[in-house]
Amino acid sequence: MGGRRQRSRKNMDGLISFFGSYHAMRAETVLKRGGLPAKLIAGPRDLSPNCGVALRFEYAQRERALGLLDEQRVRIDGVHRFVPRTDGWRSTEVVPWRR
């Protein structure tokens, strides 16, 4: 199981930003209950000054993740594809999100 957990974290190249930490915590619960790996992290301020918390997830699963969040009416600020680096994060793509 340890190898599976490592692989999941390595593939978490997406980031969801939120308007408030309440929504970030709800989103983590919704995605995990839906069988998707998710992890709360400190949110990069250059992406979303609204909330200090963001959610890492597998970007390849974004349609499924966004569908689950929409079903549960979790408000999000944006969806971003990120490349993890040793000196922080950098955005490579921003996906507009409107409900």
Image: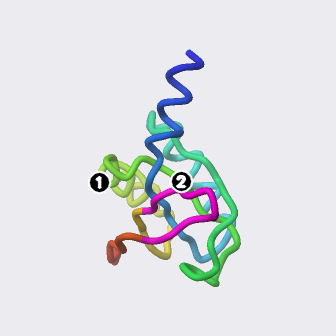
Q: How many marks?
A: 2
What residue is rendered at 48% in x and 30% in y? 7
On the image, the x and y values in percent for residue 13 come to 44, 52
On the image, the x and y values in percent for residue 6 come to 55, 29
**Color theme of the render:** rainbow
Q: Residues within 10 Å of mark 2 (few under 14, many from 20)?
A: many
Query: Of the residues shown, which amino acid type is indicated by label 1?
Result: Glu
Q: Is residue 71 above or below residue 95?
A: above
Q: Which mark is residue 35?
A: none
Label 2 SS: strand
Residue that numbered label 2 is attached to: 56
Q: Nearer the viewer, mark 1 or mark 2?
A: 2
Determine the main secondary structure of the stretch shown in magenta.
strand
Residues at circles 1 and 2 in contact by the CB criterion of under 8 Å: no
Query: Which residue extends farthest top?
Result: 1
The answer for how far apart the CA atoms under marks 1 and 2 are is: 14 Å
Residue 65 is one of the magenta-drawn residues:
no
Instruction: Determine the image quadrant of residue 88.
Output: bottom right
Would you say 31 lies left or right of 64 here?
right
Query: Of the residues shown, which amino acid type is indicated by label 2?
Result: Arg
Q: Magenta region: which residues?
A: 82-91
Q: Quadrant of the C terminus?
A: bottom left
Please tell me which residue lies in front, 27 or 15. Answer: 15
Q: Residues within 10 Å of mark 1 (few under 14, many from 20)?
A: few
On the image, the x and y values in percent for residue 15 come to 49, 61
Label 1 SS: helix
What residue is rendered at 49% in x and 40% in y? 10
What residue is rendered at 46% in x and 56% in y? 72
On the image, the x and y values in percent for residue 96 come to 33, 77
Query: Which of disc 2 and disc 1 is earlier in sequence?
Result: 2
Residue that numbered label 1 is attached to: 63
What residue is rendered at 56% in x and 15% in y? 1
